[in-house]
Structure formats: structure tokens, C-alpha cells
Image (cartoon, rainbow, N blue to C red):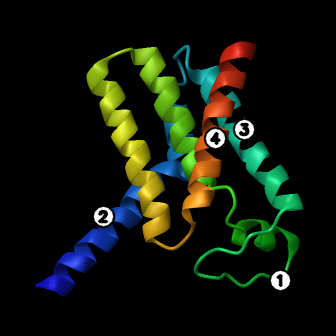
């Protein structure tokens, strides 16, 4: 019974972590194509990715479960700090919370961001410091986008 529960938790958190991935971000952008959120969504997605790329170019921190790499792009992907999944989901959670301005949706977005962040540690893709870095980048991206747009 314990192994079955563990398997279910692993699958759930693997699926949850995808909400902070590129495919989910692109899907959300497509869903909001006719919304006033389209430009902030694109800007925030690009900004979080740019922040993470620049940091990882200059600072390499191996993932908790080490990944092999043989070229520059694989090395960027194998780097752990900061968490791009966390930066994306935190940016989205803040943007949607402000836009929808509803307590229930804010709680939902916050819980989702927390679950995605936790899943990254659970799946041994990141340490907690990587998550904190991702949270800071997601918040910074939101405020930059809010100020510019």
C-alpha cells in the first residue's frame, strides 16, 4: 500500500511541476490571445527566461540529482539556480491574482505556485535556495512588467 501511495504522489507532483514549464506557459498565452493579459504574459515569460539564462550563464550550480552535459545549452539546462519553473509560476500567480482580484482565485494561484515550487524540490531538480531565487525573479518580473506596461 505504501509503495502505491508513493507512486501516486510521485506522479501527482510530476504532473504539478509541468504547470511551471514552457508548454504550460505557451498554452496560457494562447488561451489569453484576445485578453488584455496577452502582452504582460508574453513580456513576463520572456523576462523570467532571460533572467534565468543570464544568471545560469555566469553561475553554474549543479542540480541535486546531477545531470550530465556536453555542450553550452545542456549546461544551462543542467544548472539548478534559479528555478525557472518557480519564477514562471510565481509571475503567473501574481499577475492573475492582481488581474482577477478575487480572494478565492488568489488562494488557488498561491497554492498552485507553492505546489509547483515544492514539486521541484521533491523531484530533486532544485534545492530550496533555487526556489527562493525563482520566487524573487518571479516577483521582480511581475513588478518590471507592471511598471513598464
Q: Earlier in the sequence, mark 4 or mark 3?
A: 3
Q: Earlier in the sequence, mark 2 or mark 3?
A: 2
Q: Earlier in the sequence, mark 1 or mark 3?
A: 3
Q: Quadrant of the N terminus?
A: bottom left
- Secondary structure of residue under mark 1: loop
Q: Which numbered marker is on residue 51? A: none
Which residue in the structure is indicated by mark 1? 70
Which residue in the structure is indicated by mark 3? 46
Q: Are marks 2 and 1 in contact (CB under 8 Å)?
A: no
Rounded to the nearest angstrom, the CA distance separating label 1 from label 3 is 26 Å
x, y (%) of residue 66?
65, 82
x 47%, y 33%: residue? 93
Residue 42 visible in image: no
Q: Quadrant of the C terminus?
A: top right
Which residue in the structure is indicated by mark 2? 12
Q: Earlier in the sequence, mark 1 or mark 4?
A: 1
Which residue in the structure is indicated by mark 4? 136
- Side of 24 relative to 3 (left or right): right
x, y (%) of residue 102?
32, 17
Q: Earlier in the sequence, mark 4 or mark 2?
A: 2
Amino acid at each position: 500500500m505504501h509503495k502505491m501511495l508513493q507512486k501516486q504522489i510521485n506522479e501527482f507532483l510530476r504532473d504539478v511541476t509541468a504547470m511551471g514549464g514552457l508548454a504550460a506557459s505557451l498554452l496560457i498565452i494562447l488561451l489569453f490571445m484576445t485578453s488584455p493579459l496577452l502582452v504582460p504574459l508574453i513580456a513576463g515569460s520572456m523576462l523570467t527566461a532571460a533572467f534565468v539564462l543570464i544568471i545560469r550563464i555566469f553561475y553554474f550550480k549543479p542540480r541535486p540529482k546531477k545531470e550530465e552535459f556536453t555542450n553550452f545549452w545542456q549546461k544551462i539546462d543542467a544548472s539548478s539556480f534559479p528555478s525557472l519553473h518557480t519564477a514562471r509560476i510565481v509571475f503567473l500567480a501574481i499577475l492573475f491574482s492582481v488581474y482577477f482580484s478575487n480572494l478565492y482565485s488568489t488562494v488557488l494561484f498561491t497554492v498552485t505556485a507553492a505546489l509547483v515550487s515544492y514539486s521541484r524540490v521533491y523531484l530533486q531538480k532544485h534545492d530550496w535556495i533555487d526556489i527562493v531565487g525563482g520566487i524573487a525573479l518571479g516577483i521582480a518580473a511581475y513588478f518590471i512588467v507592471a511598471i513598464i506596461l
